[in-house]
Image: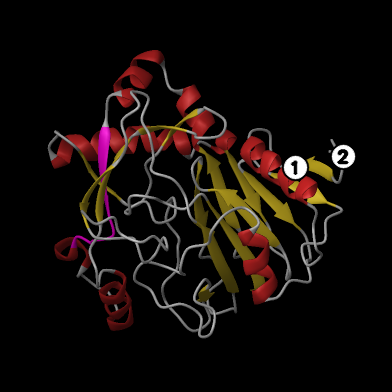
Amino acid sequence: MSSKNFEIQPVAGRIGAEIVGVDLSADLSDDIISEIRSTLVQYKVIFFRRQQLDANGQVAFARRFGEVTTAHPTVPSLPEHPEILDLNYTRTVARANNWHTDVTFVDRPPLGSILRAIAIPPSGGDTIWANSVTAYQDLPAHLRNLADQLWAVHSNAYDYAAAIVDVPEEVRAYRAVFTSTVYETIHPVVRVHPESGERGLFIGGFVRRIRGLSQTESDDIVRLLQSYVTRPENTVRWRWQVGDVAFWDNRATQHYAIADYGDQPRHVQRVTIVGDIPVGIDGKQSEVVKGDSSTYNRRVPVTA
């Protein structure tokens, strides 16, 4: 497959495509950027092999798709680059080996994330993405009808009573930073994509409970819906090489960084793009319960 300006090579049947013939360090035309964006919306995650991109170039590329966020609402940024989250797994124990959509605990989760590979282990360290739109489409009609009515509470807070057993001190220290400001937002379980109009399951690792249900009921329903997201046919697995760039639509995907590389070096850097407030199928928007994300999303708070 091809567009006017580059070649598109699908990687899996339902999600993921490699874009061939684009140098992300170049001054790309508005036409090329528009085609990249369309490809992203269609394939949900797109890949660019062996790019010659530095930190400044990564931020500049991200800005072509919208305003960029600060690195993270609570975790410090890369020094001198407030937009970049430095994920050097050689030096940290914080590994994203759980299914999640980025930063869903704020009112405006990122539109998308752009990840650049700096050091990659010779084996292991792949990342898997899942298509939450085809997951929703796979649901039997009665489960779709149920999901359409549900709203979920997302938070960055941990259940420390459950997590405290056998947790190394460095992990506890990281979690203390991660939860230094607690955020909580209620999002629709079924989100309408603002560009494609597609419906997708908007859940993942930051869901704490379903509004109006007990914790046990919430856990069972989320587990059931999540099982559709992570079905193998809804996923794509990327084997990283140094210089690779992955760009995913955070509004329609979940991802999982596989922690199977032991002490081998794995160093990546992430930039995220400011998103919009999620909307359910009834047209209602997400609701903030706790935390002000205006600094993260670079917005000036509205005053009366």
How dense is the environment of label 2, judged by Cα within 10 Å: few (below 14), some, or many (20 and up)? few
Classify residue 304 as left or right of residue 143.
Answer: left
Can see residue 41?
yes
Above or below residue 71? Residue 281 is above
Farthest top residue in view: 141
Quadrant where the N terminus sits is top right
Please report whichever mark, 1 or 2, sits nearer to the chain's N-terminal start.
Answer: 2
Residue holding disc 2: 4
Give me the disc on residue 35: 1
- For numbered disc 2, what is the local secondary structure? loop
* Magenta span: 151-159
Inspect the magenta stretch and tell me whether residue 152 lies in it. Answer: yes
> At x 59% / y 65%, what residue is drawn?
125
Classify residue 285 as left or right of residue 5.
Answer: left
Given contact means CB atoms under 8 Å apart, are the residues at marks 1 and 2 in contact?
A: yes
Give the amino acid at mark 2.
Answer: Lys
Looking at the picture, how far across and down is residue 175, in whole percent?
Answer: 29, 72
Looking at the picture, how far across and down is residue 283, in whole percent?
Answer: 35, 27
Classify residue 14 as left or right of residue 286.
Answer: right
* Residue nearer the viewer, 175 or 113: 113
Q: Colour mode?
A: secondary structure
Inspect the magenta stretch and tell me whether residue 167 lies in it. Answer: no
Q: Picture quarter containing residue 24?
A: bottom right
Count of number-bearing discs: 2
- For numbered disc 1, what is the local secondary structure? helix
Can see residue 120?
no
Looking at the picture, how far across and down is residue 170, in whole percent?
Answer: 32, 82
